[in-house]
Every structure is written in structure tokens, then in C-alpha cells.
Amino acid sequence: MGQIDGGYKTRMAEKDAISELNHKLDSLLELVARAVPAAPRAPDFKTAEAFLWSPRPGELVPVHKVNRVDIDLLCAVSRLRDILLDNTRRFANGLSANNALLWGARGMGKSSLVKAAHAAINRENKNQNLKLIEIHREDIESLPALMALIKDAPYRFIIFCDDLSFDNDDTSYKSLKAVLEGGIEGRPDNVIFYATSNRRHLLPRDMIENERSTAINPAEAVEEKVSLSDRFGLWLGFHKCSQDDYLEMVNGYVRHYGLDMEADKLRADALEWATTRGSRSGRVAFQYIQDLAGRLGKAI
């Protein structure tokens, strides 16, 4: 009888040990699953014409209503508008096109032009096969993962980064250089990169000057840093607008939104608004129009 009880206790102990081991293995597998993110999956691109890239967990979030203005409202930048439109149109039609860097004065419609050009080309083609993907500047290092996600999709993509620039200790610009032109795989045929920046070379001037003064070979050090902007075949420079340009923007908005104000009074009012802001730009013009519409009892 004692031998039977002993064998039973041994089997129960072994069973308990196996059960505890299985529990620990399940816990370990759960921890591993949390630590290793799931592979990124492409969304249904038919659901939207614009997406926001989220590198963690690695997904494209549909944007069903894009914050943008009609391209006809971008006054005083007609030459730049036509150049970017032509480049975007060629890309959308499967022809050769360049990555584009829109640089220069703040508030002059750089990011607005990218979004408006995308919408205008999709209206022309009526099939919305051109998708706009926004990537935040701090997520630039995840560009290779984004490229891998979309390179085989039957659409064409503008990857757009607003306010792109790099600081002194930031080395992520090297990742962007490789993705744009320098990598062994290269940029996928269905992808083009548009960026806006206040800096022509995307790097602060003091960073470039510091390289000139401290590097062993100053010329080579500077070349290595400014070569990033060379990856953009199309440079579009936006400069501070004149008073006439500013008033043209204001009048364009007034006509578009049907705001009723006598011409001389509108001119004086708009100039006073710009003076109180200390600058003239497309952004200041639109802010004035928003204030004017509110005073006239309208919502735009």
C-alpha cells in the first residue's frame, strides 16, 4: 500500500512540475510576442488617397480628410506651382521625375503646394492612383521599412516630409541619403520624395561653418553634409513676398470665399494686419481672411 501511495505522489509531482513548466513557457512566449513587433502590413489603399506613416507598430493610417487648400488659391507662386505640377504629373503617369525640395521663407505655401498638387493630379487622372504619405521628420530612420511596405503596391506614392531639417548631433540624414539615391536597392520606381524646409541644405549654417573650421579636411567634411540636398533633383526656392504679392493673395481668398468689402478698405485693413504681425506671407494672408470672415459673420 505504501508503494502505491509513493508512486501516486511521484506521478502527481511530475504532473505539477510539467504544468508549472508549461505555464512558464506560455509566459515566456507572451513576453517574446510583446518584444517582437508584428511585421508591418499594407492597408487597403482604396480606402483613402492620403496616409500617415506610424513606424510603431509599422502601419499606414488612412487620412480621409486632408487639410489643404485648392491649388488655384496659391497666388504669387505660379511659376513654382507649374514646375511642381509638371513633375508630379510626369511621375503619376509613369514617366521620369525628380525628388523635390521646397525650401525658403516660412508661410509661403511650401507644404500647401505639395498637398494641393497631389489633389490636382488626382482630379486630372480621376482614378486616385497617386497616394500621399506623410512621414514625420523624427521618423526618417524608418524610411526603409516604409519603402519595403509600398514598393510592390499597384499605386504611385509621394512620400512627404514637412519641415525637414537636421541638427548638429543628428545622423539620421545619412539614412535619408541612402534611401533617396545612394543605397544598393535604390528608390522604388513607384515612390518619389517631396520635402519642405526653411534651410536650403537642410542643415544649420553653423553646423557647416563648424565643419569648415574644425575638420581635418574641411572641404570633404562640408561636401559630405551638404550632399544630402543634392539627392533632390528639383529645388524650388520660396522667398519673402512683396506687398503686391501679399495683396494678391488676400484678393484671391476674398474672391474665392465671396467676402464683401470695399477695395480701398480691404487694402488698408489687410496691410494693417500684416504690419501688426511684422511679416507678409501666404500664411499671414490666410489668417487675415479667417479674421475678416469672422467679422463679416461667415465661416470658411
Image (cartoon, rainbow, N blue to C red):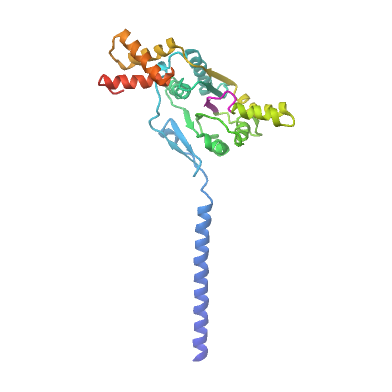
Left or right: 170 as drawn, with respect to 59? right
Q: Position of residue 108 (x, y in %)?
A: 46, 20
Q: Position of residue 88 (x, y in %)?
A: 51, 21
- Lateral position of residue 292 relative to residue 74, left or right: left
195, 289: nearer the viewer: 289
Residue 159 shows in the view: no
Rendered residue at 34%/19% (across/down) = 289
- Between 240 and 138, the one lying in front of the other is 240
- Image vertical order of residue 143 relative to residue 282, above or below: below
Query: Could you say where residue 219 lies in the image, as x and y percent from the top left?
Result: 72, 26
Magenta segment range? 192-202
Q: Is residue 253 visible?
A: yes
- Furthest residue toward bottom: 1
Camera-side residue of 118 and 237: 237
Q: The C terminus appears in which quarter of the rendering?
A: top left
Answer with left or right where residue 82 lies relative to residue 184.
left
**Residue at image x 57%, y 20%?**
235
The residue lying furthest to the left in this view is 297
Based on the picture, tell me whether residue 200 belongs to the magenta stretch.
yes
Tell whether position 75 is magenta: no
Q: Quadrant of residue 193?
A: top right
Percent across and percent down for residue 225 are: 65, 29
Q: How many marks?
A: 0
| Residue displayed at 39% across by 22% down | 69
* Residue furthest right in the image: 216
Please state which of residues 135 and 42 is positioned toward the viewer in this rendering. 135
Report whether 268 appears left or right of 96.
left
